[in-house]
C-alpha cells in the first residue's frame, strides 16, 4: 500500500519557510461519496481532524449557527457536529436543546413554533449575549457546507432519520454528511434507509462493534465514536485493523484537562490512535493537529489549509560576553557564501558577469562534487563540518532515527534547532572554541547549539530577512570594534534552487534567478570592500540541478507495506526503515525482482564510494532498504516538478556545484580540477588558523593549490 502523505520531491527551503498572511479559510472537499469513504478509511497516514462540537461556539458566535461554522473553519479544516430538531410545522432546523431559552431570544419548546416564527428569533452565544444571527435550517446548513466542511449530523429525539436523509439527498450533500447514531439499531435503520451514507456509530467496546456487524452495518460505512475517554490500545487496534476511524470526544473532561495541563494532550491523543477529536476547544485542538500534520508530513487532496501567519523570528541572536582573543584580532576574515542549487556551469551558461569577474581575480574549480545524497541539508552541513552526511548524521533533508523513534525534517523548526541531530564540529563552533568570533547569516546547523555552542551572532532562517538586509547585516558585523568583530561569516541565499526546481535548470526563470544572485554577490563584495578589511570569499553551492522525466515517473511500489516500513523519500533517494527487521529480506527480494528504472540496495550493499551504506552509517539513520532511481527518473506520487537534484554526483554531472574563491589568501586567475566538498572545511580552518583536532573526511592538501 502506498503512503498517501508521502513527500514526492525535494522540498525547497523557500517553500518550507515562507509564510504569507491569507484570510482564506481551511476547507475540506469531496466531490463524491466514494471520495469521502476513501478519506475515512483508516491508515497510518490518515488526516486527523477536529470536530467542532455544536459547530464551535465562541464569544459572539452561538452554537449551531452557519456564521459560527464559518468562523471555526477559518482556523483549521473542520468536521462540524451539529444538531437537528423539528419545528411545529415539521421543518428541520438546527438546535441542540428542546427548549429555546438558552440559545435564542425565544422561550419554551421548539416544537411549539413554526419555522417562520423561529426565523424571527436571534441566537445567543454561550454567555447569553444576543447576536444578529438566526436559526438556520438543515438545508441551509447542508448547502453552505459544500466544499467547505464535513458534517456529522446529530439527529435529536423525535426527528425521523428518514427526514434527515431526505434533506441530504435533496441538497446532494451525501459526500460531506455523516449521520450520527447512538446504538446498533439506529445504525441499522440508517444503513437500510441509505446504504451509501457514512454513519457515525457508538463503539465503546468490541461487543458494541459485534452488534453493529450483526446488524449488517459494513465496516466501510462506519466512523466509530469511541467515547469521551481515551479508549485502550486494544480497541484502537481492533477498529484500525478494520480500517475504521475513531472519534474521541474530548468535550468535557479531556478538554478541561488540556486547558489545565497543556494542549499537547490533543497531539498525544492523535499520536496514540485517535483520528478525529470532537472538541469544545476547536482552535486549540486544531493547532495541535496541524502541528501533527506538519510533523508527519500528512497530505490529503481533500484538505486545504491556507498558510497561517506563523510568528516569524527575525531577531539577531547574540551570545553575550564573547570577544576575540588578541591573536584572533590579527587573523584574516572569511565569508563563506552558499547559493543554493547553483550548478557548476550556471555562471557561464547564463553569463553571471559579476561572479565571472570575481572568479578571474581568484580561483575557480571545474566543479565541486557534492556528497551523497546531493541535497541541501546534508551538503551544507558537510561543507560546514568536513564530514560526509553519514558521518555527521544529517543523512537527508528528512530521515528517521530509530533510537529516537523520531524523524528529522528540515521544515520542522523544533527539530532543526535540536543539537542532538548534528555531529561533527561546524566551522563556527571550531572558531568559537578558539576564541575567534563567528557570525551566521543563515547556514544549516547554525540554529542549534552544536556542542553547546552557537555562533556569536546568528539568525534563525527566515525569508522575511531579504537579501539586501542580509548584506547590510554583514556590513554591520564587519564594522564592529575589533574585539567584537566576527572573522568567520556564513551567508546563504535560497536561489537559484527554487527556480531550478519549479521551472527546470534550462528555463528563463532560472536564468533570472542566477542573475539575481549574481547581483547580490556583487553588492555583498561592494559592501565588504568599503570596510577595507582583508576578507577572503569562498563561494559555493550545495548541489546542482537536472531536468527529470516528468511524464514517466516511478510510483512507489505497492509491495511496500506502510504498516511495516517507514518511508522517507526525496524522489531521488527512497529510504525504507523496517519496523520489524524480519520484514526486510522478503520485501527486498520482491522489489529486486520488480524494480524497473531504479536500483534496490540493502544498506550493506550500497556502493562504498557513496559513503552511504551500513559501514558509514555512524548514526544508524540510513534506511534498511534503499531505492535509487536511475536518472532521469524520479519516484513521485504525482507529476514531478521539472528540476531535481539528489542523484549520485559520480553518475550525474548536473549534480555538481560551484566553487569560487578570491581574496588576499588566494591565487589569482587559476582553475583547479573538480574536488569533493568535504575539503572546504580544512581550507577555511586553515585560512583562519584553526587547528582541527578531530578526524574529518576532508584533506587540507586537496585545496592547497588554491592558496598563495
Ligand atoms: Zn539545495
Image (cartoon, grey):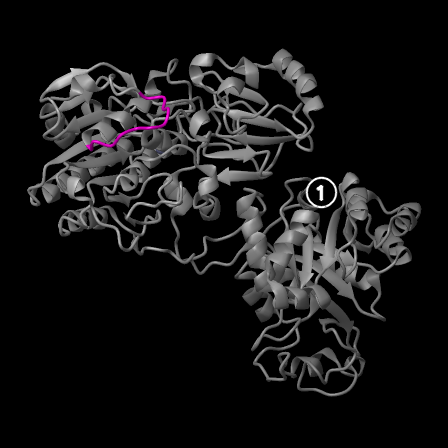
Q: How many marks?
A: 1
From the image, which quarter does the C terminus lie in? Answer: top left
Residue nearer the viewer, 358 or 443: 443
Residue 521, relative to residue 505: is it above or below? below
- Residue 606 in the image: above or below residue 658: above
Dot 1 crowding, Cα within 10 Å, few <14, some 14–19, many 20+? many
Q: Residue furthest front?
A: 326
Q: Quadrant of the N terminus?
A: top right
Q: Is residue 241 above or below residue 464?
A: above
Q: How far across and how far down the image is residue 336, in percent?
A: 23, 35
Q: Nearer the viewer, residue 551 or 546?
A: 546
Q: Secondary structure at mark 1?
A: loop
Q: Which residue is at 39% across, 52% downward?
A: 19
Say whether residue 479 is magenta.
no
Specify start and end residues of the magenta stretch as a single range: 688-698
* Residue 294 relative to residue 388: left or right: right
Q: Main secondary structure of the magenta part?
A: loop
Residue 469 makes an appearance in the image: yes
Q: Position of residue 196 (x, y in %)?
A: 78, 47
Q: Is residue 212 left or right of residue 642?
A: right
Residue at numbered disc 1: 42
Quarter of the figure with residue 96: bottom right
Q: State the residue at coordinates (18%, 47%).
A: 485
The quarter of the picture showing ligand 1: top left
Q: Quadrant of residue 425?
A: top left
Residue 172 visible somewhere in the drawing: no
Instruction: Give the residue displayed 46% in from the left and 29% down from the top.
Output: 395
Percent coordinates x, y for residue 502 in the rendering: 37, 34
Amino acid at each position: 500500500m502506498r503512503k498517501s502523505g508521502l513527500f514526492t520531491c525535494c522540498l525547497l527551503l523557500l517553500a518550507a519557510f515562507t509564510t504569507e498572511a491569507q484570510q482564506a479559510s481551511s476547507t475540506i472537499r469531496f466531490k463524491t461519496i466514494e471520495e469521502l469513504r476513501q478519506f475515512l478509511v483508516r491508515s497510518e497516514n490518515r488526516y486527523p481532524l477536529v470536530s467542532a462540537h455544536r459547530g464551535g461556539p465562541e464569544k459572539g458566535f452561538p452554537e449551531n449557527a452557519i456564521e459560527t461554522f464559518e468562523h471555526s473553519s477559518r482556523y483549521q479544516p473542520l468536521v462540524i457536529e451539529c444538531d437537528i430538531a423539528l419545528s411545529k410545522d415539521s421543518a428541520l432546523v438546527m438546535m441542540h436543546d428542546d427548549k429555546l431559552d438558552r440559545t435564542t431570544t425565544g422561550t419554551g419548546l421548539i416544537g411549539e413554533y413554526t419555522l417562520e416564527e423561529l426565523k424571527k428569533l436571534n441566537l445567543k452565544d454561550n454567555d447569553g449575549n444576543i447576536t444578529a444571527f438566526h436559526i438556520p435550517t438543515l438545508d441551509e446548513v447542508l448547502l453552505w457546507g459544500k466544499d467547505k466542511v464535513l458534517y456529522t449530523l446529530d439527529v435529536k429525539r423525535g426527528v425521523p432519520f428518514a427526514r434527515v436523509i431526505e434533506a441530504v439527498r435533496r441538497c446532494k450533500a451525501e459526500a460531506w454528511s455523516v449521520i450520527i447514531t447512538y446504538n446498533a439499531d439506529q445504525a441499522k435503520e440508517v444503513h437500510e434507509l441509505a446504504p451509501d451514507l457514512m454513519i457515525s456509530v457508538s463503539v465503546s467496546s468490541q461487543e458494541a462493534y459485534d452488534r453493529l456487524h450483526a446488524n449488517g452495518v459494513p465496516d466501510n460505512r462506519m466512523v466509530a465514536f469511541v467515547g469521551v475517554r481515551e479508549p485502550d490500545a486494544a480497541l484502537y487496534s481492533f477498529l484500525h485493523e478494520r480500517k475504521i476511524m475513531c472519534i474521541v470526544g474530548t468535550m468535557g473532561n479531556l478538554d478541561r484537562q488540556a486547558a489545565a495541563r497543556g494542549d499537547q494532550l490533543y497531539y498525544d491523543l492523535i499520536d496514540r490512535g485517535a483520528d478525529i477529536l470532537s472538541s469544545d476547544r476547536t482552535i486549540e485542538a486544531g493547532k495541535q493537529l496541524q502541528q501533527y500534520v506538519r510533523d508527519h508530513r500528512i497530505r490529503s487532496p481533500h484538505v486545504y489549509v491556507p498558510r497561517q501567519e506563523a510568528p516569524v523570528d527575525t531577531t539577531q541572536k547574540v551570545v553575550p560576553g564573547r570577544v576575540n582573543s588578541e591573536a584572533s584580532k590579527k587573523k584574516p576574515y572569511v565569508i563563506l557564501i552558499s547559493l543554493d542549487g547553483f550548478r557548476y556551469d550556471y555562471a557561464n551558461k547564463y553569463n553571471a558577469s559579476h561572479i565571472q569577474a570575481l572568479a578571474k581575480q581568484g580561483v575557480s574549480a571545474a566543479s565541486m562534487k557534492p556528497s551523497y545524497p546531493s541535497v541541501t541539508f546534508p551538503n551544507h552541513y558537510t561543507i560546514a563540518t568536513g564530514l560526509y552526511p553519514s558521518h555527521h548524521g544529517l543523512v537527508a533533508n528528512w530521515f528517521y532515527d530509530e533510537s529516537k523513534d523520531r524523524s528529522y525534517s528540515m521544515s520542522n523548526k523544533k527539530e532543526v534547532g535540536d543539537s542532538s541531530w548534528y555531529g561533527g564540529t561546524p566551522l563556527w563552533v571550531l572558531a568559537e572554541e578558539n576564541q575567534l568570533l563567528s557570525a551566521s547569516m543563515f547556514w544549516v546547523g547554525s540554529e542549534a547549539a552544536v556542542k553547546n555552542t552557537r555562533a556569536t551572532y546568528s539568525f534563525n532562517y527566515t525569508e522575511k530577512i531579504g537579501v539586501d538586509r542580509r548584506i547590510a547585516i554583514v556590513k554591520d558585523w564587519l564594522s564592529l570594534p575589533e574585539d567584537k568583530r566576527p572573522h568567520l561569516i556564513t551567508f546563504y541565499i535560497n536561489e537559484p534552487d527554487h527556480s531550478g526546481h519549479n521551472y527546470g535548470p534550462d528555463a528563463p526563470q532560472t536564468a533570472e534567478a542566477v542573475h539575481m544572485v549574481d547581483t547580490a554577490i556583487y553588492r555583498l563584495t561592494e559592501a565588504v570592500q568599503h570596510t577595507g578589511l582583508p576578507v577572503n570569499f569562498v563561494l559555493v553551492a550545495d548541489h546542482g540541478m537536472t531536468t527529470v522525466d516528468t511524464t514517466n515517473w516511478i510510483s512507489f511500489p505497492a509491495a511496500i507495506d506502510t504498516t511495516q516500513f517507514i518511508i522517507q523519500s526525496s524522489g531521488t533517494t527512497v529510504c525504507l526503515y523496517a519496523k520489524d527487521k524480519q520484514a526486510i529480506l522478503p520485501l527486498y527480494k520482491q522489489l529486486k525482482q520488480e524494480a524497473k528504472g531504479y536500483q534496490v540496495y540493502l544498506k550493506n550493499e550500497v556502493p562504498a564510494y557513496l559513503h552511504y551504506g551500513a559501514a558509514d552509517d555512524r548514526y544508524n539513520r540510513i534506511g534498511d532498504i534503499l531505492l535509487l532511481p536511475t536518472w532521469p527518473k524520479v519516484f513521485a506520487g504525482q507529476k514531478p516538478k521539472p528540476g531535481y537534484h539528489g542523484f549520485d554526483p559520480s553518475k550525474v554531472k548536473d549534480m555538481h556545484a560551484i566553487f569560487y574563491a578570491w581574496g588576499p589568501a588566494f591565487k589569482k586567475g587559476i582553475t583547479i580540477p573538480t574536488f569533493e566538498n568535504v575539503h572546504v572545511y580544512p581550507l577555511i580552518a586553515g585560512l583562519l588558523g584553526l587547528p582541527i583536532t578531530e578526524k574529518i573526511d576532508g584533506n587540507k592538501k586537496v585545496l592547497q593549490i588554491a592558496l598563495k
